[in-house]
Image (cartoon, rainbow, N blue to C red):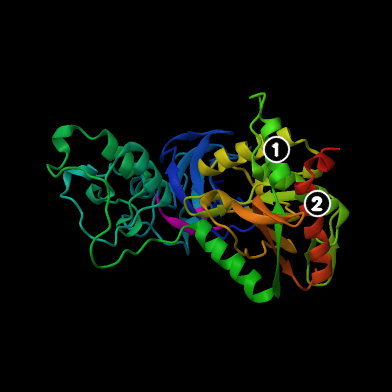
Amino acid sequence: MAIVINMPRLSDTMTEGVVAKWHVKVGDAITEGVLLAEIETDKATMDFEAFPGQEGTLLYIGVGEGETSPVDTILAIIGEKGEDIAGHLSGSPAPAQEAAPIKVAEVAAASAPVAPPVPLAAPMNSDSRLKASPLAKSLAAEKGVDLRAVIGTGEGGRIVKRDIESAATAPASQMTSAPVAAVSYPSSGYTDTPISQMRKTIAKRLSESKFTAPHFYLTMSVDMEAAMEARKALNASGEHKISFNDLVVKAVSKALKLHPAVNSAWLGDVIRTNYDVHVGVAVAVEDGLLVPVVRHADAKSLTAISAEVKDFAQRAKTKKLQPADWEGNTFTISNLGMFGIDQFTAIVNPPDACILAVGGIQAVPVVKNGAVVPGNIMKLTLSCDHRVVDGVTGSAFLNSVKDFLESPITMML
């Protein structure tokens, strides 16, 4: 009997996926563990392998590279050579090359990858409404390929990964005579960019949070003199590189143990108070934000937190994070201080009750012991879901974070 493989649900928020690349073709033998495809989800591009029992010959590919398909629709069919799979395809959209009635030979021919045209053989594309997948854009930047000179072979002419790879390896004789220059914005018109799976999910989840959870905001200034001295001493050996964000993660995690009401979630019928501290750290990527989670952050050393956050950031940018890396947060930190932002407010990241927005350290005059002296101030803004956390609770938590940062030795005990 033929085995139908559906578009997998690779994250708790995934509703559809994009096939970034097929690693097999119709007619290939499939065994357990064989890499079938790379699937672009709302959070990462993940390898999708054949599971135990999914063995045989690949008879059908239902979603082409660069194409989007909802979760649980037919991705591929595996079976014995010559097996009739027409019954599995009834009601599914047939490939454009396919004729009815469906026969196995026709399915194989229709599904077999067709060699794409050499992308750079065409004149430079001046259309400002250029369509390209996020993966293609990233690869183009890496390989120095001008997207305007590439012919897209994905759905609706969308430029996908294979187009960039073909462009990067095309012989010089096949390249357009037009010079390849850095992509610049046109002087007029507009650009329509397809919405990535990640951006769709960000839009949906944060819209629900903003318009469902009643937000309020608390801002506090923190004297970072002691934290700066502590960081300097910690990094003096050169063995470790502790960032200010690492100090914030540690301070927040210790404060959450003192204020579990902030470490809570609104679940509709109940408020869940979490006693395990799992801090999500927002990381900027090409299409938006990912929030990998430092688990049991309160029990980890600064060096352990630093190493973990650096690893998360690197894997987030290369889309190598796994679902276990971004699930289970009980509190979230968003830090824009390194981008020159003094202060901002963030939208609560469901199911958390609060998110902390961290600004940059500002050299400003401050009053100490009745005298105006140079100081270094960092502003923290706590966004709270008022269904779970009230002003007094949020303020007490923020004061504890301030105390830990202004006296760093206390959070290392």
**305 relative to 413 in the view: left or right:** left
Comes first in the chain, label 2 or label 1: 1
| Residue receiving disc 1 | 229
Q: Is residue 73 magenta?
A: yes
Give the residue drawn at x 35%, y 42%.
Answer: 141
Determine the CA span between mark 2 and mark 1: 15 Å
Looking at the rendering, the stretch of residues picked out in magenta corresponds to 66-74
Q: Is residue 68 magenta?
A: yes
Query: Mark 1 falls on what kind of element?
Result: helix
Quadrant where the C terminus sits is top right
Q: Is residue 388 visible?
A: no
x then y, percent, for residue 376: 64, 50
Q: Is residue 314 above or below residue 216?
A: above
* Disc 2 residue type (three-letter): Asp
List the single residue furthest toward the left: 177
**127 relative to 77 in the view: left or right:** left
| Residue receiving disc 2 | 403
List the single residue furthest toward the front: 371
**Label placed on residue 405:** none
Q: Residues within 10 Å of mark 2 (few under 14, many from 20)?
A: some
Q: Which quarter of the picture shows residue 334?
A: bottom right
Query: Mark 2 falls on what kind of element?
Result: helix
x then y, percent, for residue 188: 24, 67
Q: Nearer the viewer, residue 155 or 83?
A: 155
x then y, percent, for residue 262: 81, 61
